[in-house]
Image (tube, helix red, strand yellow):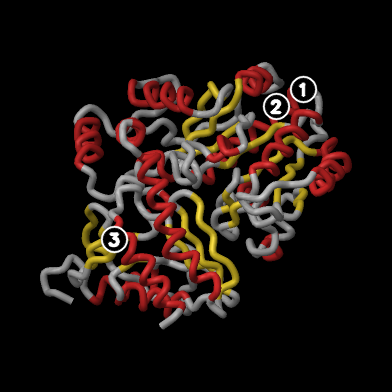
């Protein structure tokens, strides 16, 4: 490692022995790769090696890194104020952000709660649903319906509606609240459901709706729970059944929001509007943590007129002005760009270059939707081995379980995307 690097072995040793990275062990840690800087679609490691980022820093960096417009937005806002409390105080960046979110999200979502992270936005949504039902005199409706294979975050409430098997919920069985899970949708994105195939949903609601406040799901794309892309017919049916059974529909668009699936929001594939929507990840273009929970006027009115008289939540960093200012500029960059064409082009290239791998003996399935490409292997991937291979090939791809996947920044070039897909193919067929 170069002597002038910000990193030295002592720092890396401390990292290895003292710092918990996401889903890692401190007794048997995975290797970590020190990043010195990032620009465009490339991460620069401390040793000078550059990697094309295929992960958009977990769905967030849709514009790439070190974006001049976002840098300027941060600098301008910092000269005014980096943070003020949101209790009893408001400010222009938050107001403008909420105005824009109301404008661009599905119809009816016109009340906005600003949160710190995606997990918190899910907690907020679940608490909204509970307060809503309680205010309507239905306090027995304190459970949630959801589908297996989902992922909604790592805080307690969010974790309780994540996949009960893949989420290792048995470790927390005496701690987490228990909710009601139905098998994940069987039809893939471009497949249609027959009416009889949806009858099990009707039965599920018939048996359980009287004790459930809401149905929570990731619309169309299940992310970290398995990268499964399902039919819009399923989502349409869930919307219908929630209406018929006086349940709210919560759409977790934290990963899918802001164009990743080819629509601005994944709910648009099914032409439905949820009662509550969670947003995060790409909201600030990967610059700062910020999330939002939107709901309808009806939800807000019922909650506000209930026993508490207020919505019972208020994060310390709620409405952070710096994060809101960057989010405003990030949304402006997105909406004023040709993002639809960029995502469609990425989708075509991912299909052309990854789908042929479906015939490989070690591959179970290949799935592509929007700017998401997934190769599902028959066996679990050795993450340490895969990570080393990909770094050696100049790309940053981080598999999990049996999935090798990419969700690149929208600004990636055709040549750079080909380097990513080639590395995936070569790892599977060396």
Q: Position of residue 16 (x, y in %)?
A: 37, 74
Quadrant of the rendered image containing residue 37: bottom left
Q: Residues within 10 Å of mark 3 (few under 14, many from 20)?
A: some
Q: On the image, numbered disc 2 is attached to which residue?
A: 132
Name the mark on residue 238.
none
Element type at mark 3: helix
Element type at mark 2: helix
Q: Nearer the viewer, residue 315 or 327?
A: 327
Is tag 2's residue or tag 3's residue first in the polypeptide sequence?
2
Q: On the image, numbered disc 3 is attached to which residue?
A: 416
Q: Residue at x 70, y 32 (%)?
A: 248
**Image vertical order of residue 3 relative to residue 264, above or below:** below
Is tag 1's residue or tag 3's residue first in the polypeptide sequence?
1
Residue 25 seen by the camera: yes
**Image vertical order of residue 45 relative to residue 129, above or below:** below
Q: Position of residue 124 (x, y in %)?
A: 58, 36
Element type at mark 1: loop
Q: Position of residue 166 (x, y in %)?
A: 64, 64
Question: How many angstroms separate mark 1 from mark 3 (CA)?
Answer: 54 Å
Question: How many angstroms separate mark 2 from mark 3 (CA)?
Answer: 48 Å
Quadrant of the rendered image containing residue 56: bottom left
Classify residue 124 as left or right of residue 182. left
Image quarter (top left, top right, bottom left or bottom right) of the C terminus: bottom left
Q: Are the residues tagged 1 and 3 within 8 Å (C-beta)?
A: no
Residue 323 seen by the camera: no
Q: Residue at x 33, y 21 (%)?
A: 92
Q: Are the residues tagged 2 and 1 within 8 Å (C-beta)?
A: yes
Q: Residues within 10 Å of mark 2 (few under 14, many from 20)?
A: many
Name the mark on residue 136.
1
Q: Position of residue 235 (x, y in %)?
A: 67, 41
Of all residues, the one furthest to the left in this rendering is 4
């Amino acid at each position: 490692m170069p002597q002038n690097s910000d990193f030295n072995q002592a720092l890396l040793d401390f990292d290895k022995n003292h710092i918990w990275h996401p889903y890692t062990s401190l007794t048997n840690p995975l290797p970590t790769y020190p990043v010195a800087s990032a620009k465009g679609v490339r991460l620069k490691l401390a040793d000078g090696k550059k990697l094309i980022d295929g992960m958009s820093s977990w769905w967030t960096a849709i514009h790439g890194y070190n974006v001049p417009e976002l840098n300027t937005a941060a600098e301008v806002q910092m000269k005014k104020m980096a943070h003020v409390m949101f209790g009893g105080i408001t400010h222009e960046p938050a107001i403008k952000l909420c105005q824009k979110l109301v404008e661009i999200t599905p119809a009816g979502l016109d009340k906005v709660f600003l949160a710190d992270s995606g997990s918190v936005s899910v907690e907020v949504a679940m608490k909204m649903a509970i307060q809503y039902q309680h205010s309507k005199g239905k306090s027995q409706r304190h459970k949630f319906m959801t589908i297996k294979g989902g992922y909604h975050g790592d805080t307690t409430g969010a974790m309780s509606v994540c996949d009960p098997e893949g989420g290792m919920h048995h470790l927390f069985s005496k701690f987490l609240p228990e909710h009601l899970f139905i098998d994940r949708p069987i039809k893939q994105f471009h497949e249609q459901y027959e009416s009889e195939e949806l009858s099990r949903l009707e039965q599920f609601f018939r048996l359980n709706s009287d004790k459930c406040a809401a149905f929570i799901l990731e619309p169309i794309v299940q992310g970290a729970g398995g990268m499964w892309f399902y039919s819009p017919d399923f989502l349409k049916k869930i919307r219908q059944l929630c209406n018929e059974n006086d349940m709210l529909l919560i759409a977790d668009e934290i990963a899918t929001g802001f164009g990743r699936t080819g629509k601005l929001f994944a709910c648009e594939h099914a032409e439905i509007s949820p009662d509550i929507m969670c947003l995060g990840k790409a909201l600030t273009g990967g610059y700062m943590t910020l999330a939002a929970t939107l709901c309808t006027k009806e939800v807000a009115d019922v909650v506000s007129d209930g026993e508490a008289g207020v919505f019972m939540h208020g994060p310390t960093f709620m409405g952070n002005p710096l994060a809101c200012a960057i989010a405003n500029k990030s949304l402006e960059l997105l909406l004023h760009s040709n993002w639809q064409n960029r995502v469609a082009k990425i989708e075509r290239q991912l299909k052309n270059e990854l789908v042929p791998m479906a015939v490989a003996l070690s591959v179970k399935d290949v799935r592509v939707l929007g700017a998401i490409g997934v190769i599902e292997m028959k066996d679990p991937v050795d993450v340490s081995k895969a990570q080393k291979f990909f770094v050696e090939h100049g790309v940053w791809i981080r598999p999990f379980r049996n999935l090798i996947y990419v969700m690149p920044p929208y600004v990636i070039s055709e040549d750079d995307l080909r380097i990513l897909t080639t590395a995936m193919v070569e790892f599977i067929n060396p």
